[in-house]
Amino acid sequence: MRRSLRDNSLSLFFLGLFLASLAGQSFAGVNSYNAEQVEHGGEPISWGRYLVSSHFGRAVMENWQSEFLQFTVFILATVWLIQKGSNESKTPEDAGPESDQKQRVKGYAAEGAPAWARARGARLWLVSNSLLLAMAAIFLLSWGAHSLTGWTQFNDEQREHGEPTVAWGDYVLRAQFWEETLQNWQSEFLAVGTMAVFTIYLRQRGSPESKPVGAPNDETSSSG
């Protein structure tokens, strides 16, 4: 058990942080929502009811879709684009999908490699791009969920004020929806770009996200 916890400590650590912050968001959210309800003469709701509300779903999905978009774009961009000296980049000569030999697939698969490493055709394409496909799928699903929960919440507010509701297609074309969406996207792209540049010059000893402390600034990650 101790070895299993050690071997999976990174994922377990972030799972714990995720669950704790999600729970904290839900408790803060229901209190904020109920305070607003009382202020406008509405009825407060229970925590359980809030968990399945569009208000909570929209807040969660709005962040999820931007996070997974960040990873989707970063994974794809780093196949072809480089940043000299960055620990987040390949060297110029490695730009692109790389050779079968370098990727250790087909006849170059090592003993003990996963069975799919020896696959060919469509199956090899799928497994070769499975990380990107998974991240893109989660992004699209969370973006869809964000738009649906936002649309539901918007129409609920319209009814409360005696205003006409709108169709989903009309909602996703509204400036308000795209303001909320793009303000999350731009922060994710800024964070990734900053990380790529900072790793050229800055170090964190012992972290795989950093080059060795004594590595030259112009040394790209895979050049060592």
Image (cartoon, grey):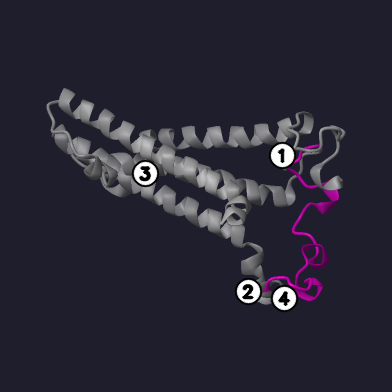
Name which residue type carries label 1: Ser
**Residue 118: which numbered mark, if any?**
4
Q: How many marks?
A: 4
Dot 2 falls on a residue whose secondary structure is helix
Residue 195: x %, y % from top left: 67, 34
Instruction: Read off the residue under disc 2.
Output: 123
Name which residue type carries label 4: Arg
Quick one: label 1, few (<14), some, or many (20+) residues within 10 Å?
few
Q: Using the image, determine if residue 19 lies above or below residue 106.
A: above
Q: CA distance from mark 2 to mark 4?
A: 10 Å
Instruction: Read off the residue under disc 1.
Output: 207
Q: CA distance from mark 1 to mark 4?
A: 32 Å
Mark nearer the viewer, 2 or 1: 1
The answer to which quarter of the image holds residue 57 is top left
At x 72% / y 43%, what residue is drawn? 208
Instruction: Read off the residue under disc 3.
Output: 172
Looking at the rendering, in which quadrant would you find the N terminus?
A: bottom right
Residue 60 seen in the current view: yes
Mark nearer the viewer, 3 or 4: 4
State yes or no: discs 1 and 4 in contact (Cβ < 8 Å). no
Q: CA distance from mark 2 to mark 3?
A: 35 Å
Kindly give the residue lying farthest to the top in the view shown: 39
Most common secondary structure along the magenta stretch:
loop
Q: CA distance from mark 2 to mark 1?
A: 34 Å
Residue 168: x %, y % from top left: 30, 48
Residue 212: x %, y % from top left: 81, 37
Whichever of callouts 1 and 4 sits on the residue coming sooner in the sequence is 4
The segment highlighted magenta reads: 85-114
Name which residue type carries label 3: Val
